[in-house]
Image (cartoon, rainbow, N blue to C red):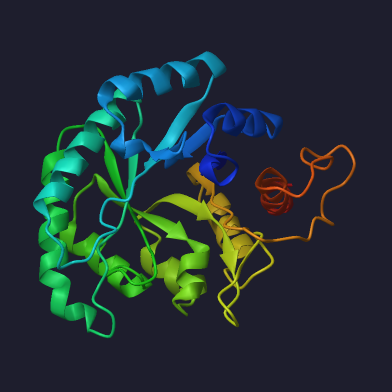
Amino acid sequence: MSRFILSAFADEIDSNLDTQMDVLDAHDIKHIEMRGVNGKLLVHYTLEEVKEIKRKLDDRGFKLSAIGSPLGKIGITDEFEPHLELFKHTLEIAKLMECKYIRMFSFYIPKGEDPSNYRDEVMSRWQSFADAAEGSGVILLHENESGIYGDTPERCLDLMKTLNRPHVRAIFDFANFVQCNAKNYPEGYELLQDYIEYIHIKDALYSNHRVVPAGEGDGNVAEILKVLHERDFEGFLSLEPHLWGYSDFSSLEPGDPGYELEESEAKRFAVAVKALNKIIKTIVS
């Protein structure tokens, strides 16, 4: 039987950790994909500072689903060694946080150039990441993102098959593939199905690449979650709404978390949660 565990990029709600946890509590979500906390990226905190963040999470019963790192989100021609050192620091953070996953990327390709020209360098850098993480118990999750080497399903598959490491797995981000004009289903999903470990929940439109609540775009969110459910997927669905400026709150009803709020990121988050829960309810009923 499948088990979908909800998590969220809580820095899209607010920069303050206490506010993040307050809002997530209202939605019965107890996991965070921690990217930014208290105005700074988690990976830029010292290990002593991380211990204090962990204490606050523990006090409220929260855990990290993943570290939402920016690793691999630099140019492929940028200097790599300082970035590798940041990765090693992030591995130590993951251990302190008792966190199994680090979200990562496969480097921005110079605009207008053929990604294949940089393939070997991408693979070499990721081999260095994988080597450094060997035996740590941490799984490196590659996120498909516009403009990086792995922005299409085909190049994501190339990365997975070339590395062929059990601790290197794939995130499936519906909106990011749409924004690259890739087809999520069945094509993209079927290419990557054996490597998908983690899901980012956001949707988007092909027409203007605008991000919308799950199920309102062209990302085939419901279709793919249904297949994952049928395959007994057990793992995280991490809400990354990207609904800045979104102003349609008509889906919220009296009694829903966020209904009474003024227009805010917390209220937009409530729209995102309700859209996802509506899909899940349809799938598992």
Note whether 129 is above or below 188 in the view shown: above
The quadrant in which residue 225 appears is bottom right
Image label count? 0
Please report the residue visible at 57 percent of the width from the left and 57 percent of the height from the top. Answer: 242
- Whether residue 151 is visible, yes or no, is yes
The quadrant in which residue 90 appears is top left
How far across and how far down the image is residue 261, in percent? 79, 41
How far across and how far down the image is residue 281, in percent? 73, 48
Please report the residue visible at 47 percent of the width from the left and 80 percent of the height from the top. Answer: 181
Towards the viewer: 49 or 174 = 49
Q: Is residue 75 left or right of residue 142?
A: left
The quadrant in which residue 80 appears is bottom left
Note whether 152 is above or below 35 in the view shown: below
**Residue found at the far front of this picture:** 39
Query: Which quadrant of the figure contains the N terminus?
Result: top right
Towards the viewer: 65 or 19 = 19
Note whether 46 is above or below 172 in the view shown: above
